[in-house]
Image: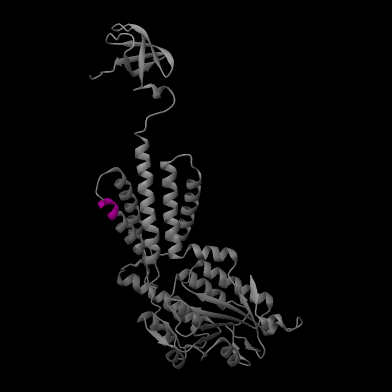
Amino acid sequence: MYFLLPALAAADPTQSPASTVLRLKIDGDVEPILATYIDEGIDDAAQRKSALVLITMDTPGGLSASMENIVQHILGSKVPVAIFISPTGSRGASAGFYILLSADIAAMAPGTHTGAASPVMLVGGYAMAIDDTMRKKINNDALAFLRSFTEKRGRNPTLAQTAITDAKAFTEKEALDGKMIDLVATSDDDLLRQLNGREITRFDGTKVKLELSNPAIVEFELSARQKFLSRIVAPDMFFLLLVIGALGLYTEFTHPGMVAPGVIGGICLVLALYAMQILPVNLAGVFLIALALALFVMEAKFTSHGVLLAGGIVSMLLGALFLIRSPFTAGGVSLGIALAVTLPFAAITVFLMRLVLRSRKWRNTTGREEMIGAEGVVVTPLAASSEGMIRIHGELWQAVSTQPVPEGKSVRVLRIDGLKLYVEPVETTA
């Protein structure tokens, strides 16, 4: 889980753990998996007796519940926590703004920004319009939460609150001048140099002097489980799992007994359902994808000269693009993935349905049903409504015909009753 930098590998094993800096990363949306990762990192730093937890951040925001979880762990951390919006061009917007101001040390790199922290309610992946009373309740709750730690951290709560009330954003200079952050640094090393020997006041009021003259930086990585789950909640992977799941179950239903497509499809759909609990999924996108599947099936059944197929492709592409959207991120299913998945899915679905429809026209080649429509030769003349013998497939059968049929003539089987065949003469043309 942990990868030590060369500086740590070369260090003396007896070196004081007080010089250890545990580095974590917030890169992307703030969601439950990331919150678990940050929580575990802070706990690990306490066990190591590290001098500092350094969290570099670049996030457009995320879920309020996950943000609150991270803030609570930062406030209760036994080890000082520094949040650093880095590198240049990064941001700590929305939920990232709360996380930044909750840290013992708040820092930003040149060319970064933070703020725009107004709460947004999501329904189907989009912001929901709410009445003034509800909006006031949500904003006042967010303001109280922000004040609860910014005042104790000695930061400017009045200016910070404008990020909620007015959705205001701040550059690193504006945040520093407004006393919302502690310093501006060009890199992690520059930040640690500026913090070395600095005395800070923890959230509980205790004073701590940071000793970072020769810090040994330890990277805290996502666990294998967290990496796997974080891949699942990526928009492109979620769309892929959803489509593969639907295709697998569709294949199993149209071709029973194949087993593997049904198993794979079921697993993919369960993983997709897990991702749906985290991602801001737009139901309109899901319905468009379902409509596309229906149009592909209809294309195989009816002659539409490609109209149904084209409609299905357009519907699935729109569904993919509408599937995941949120006001705090422009992230969603990429057009490249949408095209790469839609076209093969359309071809496979239509092909499988045509196989099913074609199989319904095939004649049985085994069993009693195979005899229906088969032709044989009369061995013993057949009188009207009387039994005689015919030879069919090299076997002798008792047969009954409604018309007289002389020996040597051909007859066709109409139906079977036990071991008796009901036949009719085969008309011949000169």
> Is residue 277 in view?
no
Percent position of residue 357, x then y: 34, 39
Residue 144's image quarter? Answer: bottom left
Residue 280 higher or lower than 398, as above or below: below
Percent position of residue 134, x then y: 34, 70
| Residue that protrudes farthest toward the left in the picture | 430
Quarter of the figure that contains the N terminus:
bottom right
The residue segment tinted magenta is: 306-311
Q: Residue at x 49, y 70 (%)?
A: 66
Q: Residue at x 45, y 93 (%)?
A: 177
Between 56 and 161, the residue placed more toward the observer is 56
Quarter of the figure that contains the C terminus:
top left
Residue 337's image quarter? Answer: bottom left
Horizontally, is 108 left or right of 398 in the view? Answer: right
Q: Residue at x 29, y 15 (%)?
A: 424
Between 215 and 177, the residue placed more toward the observer is 215
Residue 403 higher or lower than 152, as above or below: above
Q: How many marks?
A: 0
Horizontally, is 366 left or right of 188 in the view? Answer: left
- Check if residue 309 falls in the magenta segment: yes
- Check if residue 80 falls in the magenta segment: no
